[in-house]
Amino acid sequence: MLTAGSSTETDWSFLQKLIFRLSFIFFGLYIIPFPVNYIPIFNSWLDWIHGSWTWLVPQTGKYILRLPYEVTVTPNGSGDSTWNYVQVFLILSSAILGTLIWTLLDRRRNNYQRLLYWFTVAVRYYLAFNLIAYGSYKVFKSQFPAPNIYRLTETYGQSSPMGLAWTFLGYSKGFNYFMGFAEIIGGLLLLFRKTKTLGALFCMTVTANIVAINFCFDVPV
């Protein structure tokens, strides 16, 4: 990876430039409006973005995807819904269309070294922020609380796969510390240029466990 301001120039292949353009638009749209969504002065702009999605997603589900039901359940922070999947479909479609237009208008460029550098920084910080946040939820025992009286009195067979996982993960405070600090350490490593590669490898291991739990225990995230 070249640093900002590097004078070294390399020619990228057509496929490399195509993949970068697609990735840049897709992940850029996926990450937006981070980090300005945490700055109060941008509230009006954020309201406009939210309003645009609120209109686009149901219309896409109804007229383009022809879903047999209306998409009305908006994201609530506790799990994915049809709304999320339609939104990702729109982001991917926009990325493909944008890549085609970008390729036609900018086909003579040799590479995107400088843009790649700053794009990588943005993705690193976005991932680091989320890992540190979710790690903190575990360290302070807010994501996986101790089993409540309802959970303790229901039969084992009544537990949903996700309920079983939450009971297992919420039982041990020490295991929450282990998971939480692993995510926080991975996120912190991503923040610095000298440790970003180690951080990426570390985070791959940590997030692989998260993904496995989500799929294997039917966690809708």
Image (cartoon, grey):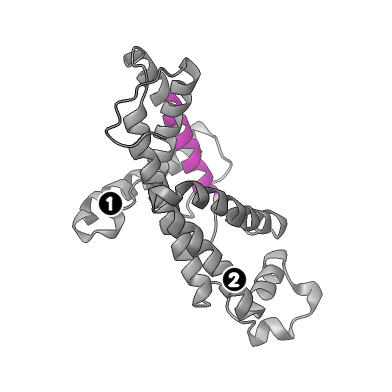
Rounded to the nearest whole Å, what is the CA distance between mark 1 and mark 2? 35 Å
Q: Secondary structure at mark 2?
A: helix
Establish if 49 lies above or below 96: below
Magenta span contains residue 208: no
Q: In front here: 154 or 59?
A: 154
Q: Position of residue 188 (x, y in %)?
A: 43, 59
Establish if 95 lies above or below 211: above
Give amino acid for label 1.
Leu
Give amino acid for label 2.
Phe
Image point 30% across, 55% down: which residue?
Answer: 37
Magenta span contains residue 94: yes
Q: Which residue is mark 2?
A: 178
Main SS class of the magenta portion in the image: helix
Q: Which residue is mark 1?
A: 46
Q: Secondary structure at mark 1?
A: helix
Q: Position of residue 173 (x, y in %)?
A: 60, 80
Image point 32% across, 31% down: which residue?
Answer: 114
Q: Is 150 positioned to the left or the right of 73 in the image?
A: right
- Marks 1 and 2, the one that precedes in the sequence: 1
Residue positioned most to the left? 41
Q: Is 219 positioned to the left or the right of 57 in the image?
A: right
Per the rendered image, the range of residues in magenta is: 82-97
Q: In front here: 21 or 192?
A: 192
Q: Position of residue 181 (x, y in %)?
A: 53, 68
Image point 79% across, 76% down: which residue?
Answer: 156
Q: Is residue 70 in view?
A: no
